[in-house]
Amino acid sequence: MSAVSDPSGTQSDPFQIVSGHLGKVIRVLEAVGLSLEGVRDISREVLELSPDERFTESAKIISKRVLEPSDLDSDVRAELADQFDGDVSDVMESLLPMWIQTMEGHKEQVQRDILDLLVKSRENDLDALAMAVFVERWLGAFETAYEQQAADGNLKLALSVTLALNSRFLEIVENDVAEFSEEFLRDIVRSDYYLDRIYDESSTPHPDTLSKQEIEGRIRLHGAVLAYQQRDISLNRGAELAGISRSQFEGALLEAGSQPRHGPVDEPLFDENEPWF
Amino acid sequence: MTLRSPLVLDNVVLSSFKTAGWFESLAFPRPEYEIVVPEVIWKREFAVQWTVDESPDWIRLESSDSELVSDVPGQLSRADWTCIAIAEDEHGTVVTNDRALRNRCRARGVEVRWGTKFMIRIFKECGISQQEYDEGVDDYLGDVYLPREKQRKVREQTK
């Protein structure tokens, strides 16, 4: 097969892209009175939990921290404690919309940069796909938490998923990792599994029952579908990224509500004046 | 735009003709135009999907060792790039229904034609009979995803 390369020798990788956005995320947190040190402490505490606890119970850590010393600016804490009387759902009512609005912009920019990377390079495919899916799931978790709060639903579960993904993100950018760990990849699939439970769906098998290869396969597929939906890549490239056949990838696209981009669309099917045989 | 030989077919075109029962009709443009398929497409995709061994004698399987340069190497698969490389090496025409591959061919100045227009040309010039067309067109459209209005027009084609 012929080889193809980028003459500019673009060297950016998904980790550089993500790290570059950390500063913006921190400013969001600071805007609501959370210190980076406080966020680090919360994240460490979250990551020490078992996977099941991390994704279902870690929201308790937020309510504990909102009411207790050290992580919040004291004036902010006092105001929150007075205003919300210790109920985390009241706290979230004001914080979630602001987080979502700010994160939406970052999510679009991070995903744009990550997906551009997939088009401009043939290296680090799995890392770029994993980060694209992670960002999608991360914002999805915030939005689910907002919906659950508005619907008086399972806010604790949705917040726990959000916090679990948040904590993993911070771990990656703060530890300057060179490649994504298996735990990072599993957390992406865990977010699907636990968010499915909020909607009483069971399309995602329990991540602990999946092999590393199966986890990677799911992420490749979801990432490839995202890339096809948001970038002008060929169907064969989507299949290549997903590690499956073209017809299997077509099926996945259709299941995701997207159509393969075939043509012609705007041209006439037959033109007597067009030179052919 | 002059149609140039060889005609380099991608797997979307191969598959759609096979699905519709028109596979042998791909030989219609010969002998004026050679039919070329990248070897990687035949061996790793088409032959696997359709459980065939040998390629027919009217198809030339080809590979390319060309090192292509592009600022968007990740836009296409390696097999797609091989279609472009062969067409560039031999001054031929890529035949595909994939929009991204078509766009990249045009950006590189490679002659390219839509697979569906190629199919209709073969049909109108009697490489596919009306009966074969009527019997196969729904299967063809099950393999090539076109807007409803275009599907209707494909179904309505006559000689």
Image (cartoon, coloured by chain):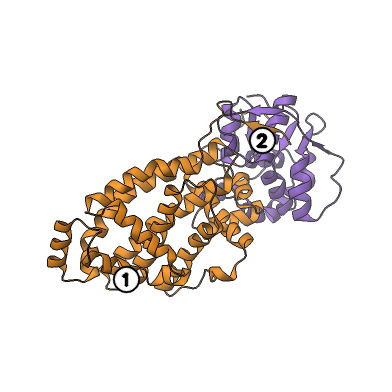
Chain colours: A orange, B purple
In front of the other: label 1 or label 2? 1
Q: Within 10 Å of the Cα at label 1, are there few (<14), some (14-19), or many (20+) other Cα atoms? A: few
Q: Quadrant of residue B6?
A: top right
Dot 2: what SS?
helix
Question: In which quadrant is the N terminus of chain A drawn?
Answer: top right
Q: Is residue A82 left or right of residue A268?
A: left
| B117 to the left or right of B61 | left
Judged left or right of residue A134, residue B151 is right
The chain carrying label 1 is A
Give the number of callouts.
2
> Which amino acid is tagged 1?
Lys
- Label 1: state its secondary structure: helix
Marks 1 and 2 close (CB-CB < 8 Å): no
Q: Residue furthest front?
A: A70
The residue identified by callout 2 is B81
What residue does disc 1 label? A60
Q: Position of residue B101 (x, y in %)?
A: 60, 37
Kindly identify the residue that appears in the image at 46 percent across and 49 percent down. Answer: A175
> Which residue is at a point 49% across and 60% down the rendered structure image?
A188
Q: Position of residue A220 (x, y in %)?
A: 57, 53
Query: What percent of the width, then of the height, locates residue A143?
Result: 33, 60
Q: Nearer the viewer, residue B16 or A87?
A: A87
Residue at the image point whose x is 69% and y is 54% from the top: B136
Quadrant of the rendering where the C terminus of chain A is positioned = top right
Question: Which residue is outermost to the bottom?
Answer: A200
In the displayed structure, A128 sits above or below A141; it is above
Kindly identify the amino acid type of the residue bearing the numbered disc 2. Answer: Trp
- State the CA–CA distance, disc 1 to disc 2: 52 Å
Chain letter behind tag 2: B
Q: Is residue A110 above or below residue A186?
A: above
Q: Quadrant of residue A249?
A: bottom right
